[in-house]
Amino acid sequence: MVAKLVIDKKREGRALESAEIRDFVAGFTAGEIPDCQMSALAMAICCRGMDERETADLTDAMMRSGECLEWDAVPPSADKHSTGGVGDKLSLVIQPLAAACGLAVPSLTGRALGLTGGTADKLESIPGYNAALSLDEFQRVVRETGLAMTVQTDTITPADRKLYALRDVTGTVASIPLIVASILSKKLAEGAGTLVFDVKCGNGAFMKTREDAAALAKALVAGARAAGRRSAALITDMSSPLGRAVGNANEVAEALAILRGEVPQDRPDVALSVELASLMVSLAAEIPLDGARRMASEKLADGSALAKFEAVVSAQGGDLGRFEAYMKSPVSRFRVQSMRYGAVAAIDAEKVAEVAFALGAGRSKPGDRIDPLAGVDLAVGVGDRVALGAPLATLVKSGGPDGLEEAAAELLKAFTIAHSAERPASLVLERVGLDG
Ligand code: URA
């Protein structure tokens, strides 16, 4: 394989052979193909695309660049991947819920980059929680508790880590085949037999339009199936934040409230959690979706999902008692009040994320420190009625109140208060890979 000829071929819009893709990725991972050639190929893929077979080959080559796990001796295994949204703490509910329904859930998760927080950062706001397990520890915790949630180690898909760093600086992130290979190679290496995708769509999401979200969802499901996994996706609305908390520690507190049954199951974010867990159960255990929905709903209501969450936190060294104390730490707060009487018609997710980020809840480059207590606590959701002067949200940060007043002025712009507004019936916009 001559790297320059492979780049030429893709630049001319021709399909690459499986062996060309495999050898290129292997050469890049081993450091034999320099970054400039990988960047050129990434740009050619961005401009010319890849068909389904090429995308599956690229995914497979990236998956095989590192360690791949297997789960023969455990119950049916499944994981859920979300493309990430504002206030998206749903993994903290869905993964324990699926495990409470009897699945093994090996969940390798991410840290925050950009505006939206990663599940690992949220979990690390629990004192003692080790979100950086070795792969041996990860496998042991999954076998013992049915679930583990940790960041992916350096030995999983090293090709993706190297390639993503290049894509980030060469304008080659926005390419469906590259995104699919990146997301899917990591999820396939995790070894779960079923993969469910929550593809977020809207101004607070990676995919802003319905067309882009649908293209990504279809490609992810096709790729997972090509790799022999059961798979389905939901395209879900991300125009307003999920739930009420946007940050890190406050999102864990909200997930705990959901798991404790303190939030009604028909609130849209809770209903979406139950639906995604049900999909995992239905596909992995091969039972009808209606039965899986009943089971998931019961396991949330009877405290089994909460018990699973407590078990995994404890198995990974976390202390929920100390977390409750941590949530009472001294912080600076600022309340945002409604300037109008009416109903909340929209809460701009991107704007809320920008404010949470400015308070310290996110990081702009790997290694930046985040403030786990920083964030936005919404007092209302879309469809709620508000009086003049009623609280809309509270901004929170560690340390002094500097910057809070300016942030509050920005946050106010996120709210559209109209004469009347409907509460969304469901966040699910479209189902991919399912009949009903
Ligand atoms: N998330 C990933 O893991 N990879 C991408 O390319 C885009 C989003």
Image (tube, rainbow, N blue to C red):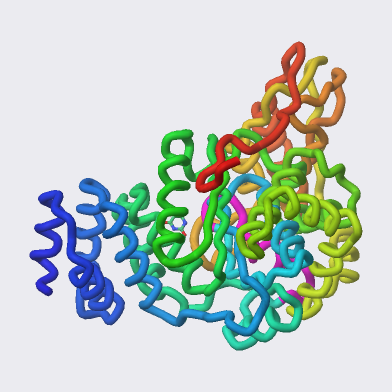
139, above or below 166, in the image? below
- Residue 149 visible somewhere in the drawing: no
Q: Classify residue 180 as left or right of residue 305.
A: left
> Which residue is drawn at the image coordinates 75% and 57% (left, top)?
93
Q: Classify residue 175 as left or right of residue 122.
A: left
Q: Quadrant of residue 415?
A: top right
- Residue 434 visible somewhere in the drawing: yes
Residue 4 percent across, percent down from the top left: 10, 66
Residue 206 percent across, percent down from the top left: 49, 45
In the image, 291 versus 262, the foreground residue is 291
Q: Quadrant of residue 8?
A: bottom left
Q: Quadrant where the C terminus lies? A: top right
> Which residue is drawn at the image coordinates 65% and 29% (left, top)?
414
Q: Quadrant where the N terminus lies? A: bottom left
77, above or below 361, in the image? below
> Which residue is drawn at the image coordinates 30% and 65% (left, top)?
57
Q: Classify residue 49 as left or right of residue 131.
A: left
> Which residue is drawn at the image coordinates 40% and 50% (left, top)?
219
Region in magenta: 113-129
84, above or below 425, in the image? below
Residue 410 percent across, percent down from the top left: 65, 32
The dominant secondary structure in magenta is loop
In the image, 373 versus 253, the foreground residue is 253
The image quadrant in which ligand 1 is located: bottom left
Q: Quadrant of residue 170?
A: bottom left
In the image, 308 versus 11, the foreground residue is 308
367, above or below 414, in the image? below
In the image, 15 versus 32, the foreground residue is 15
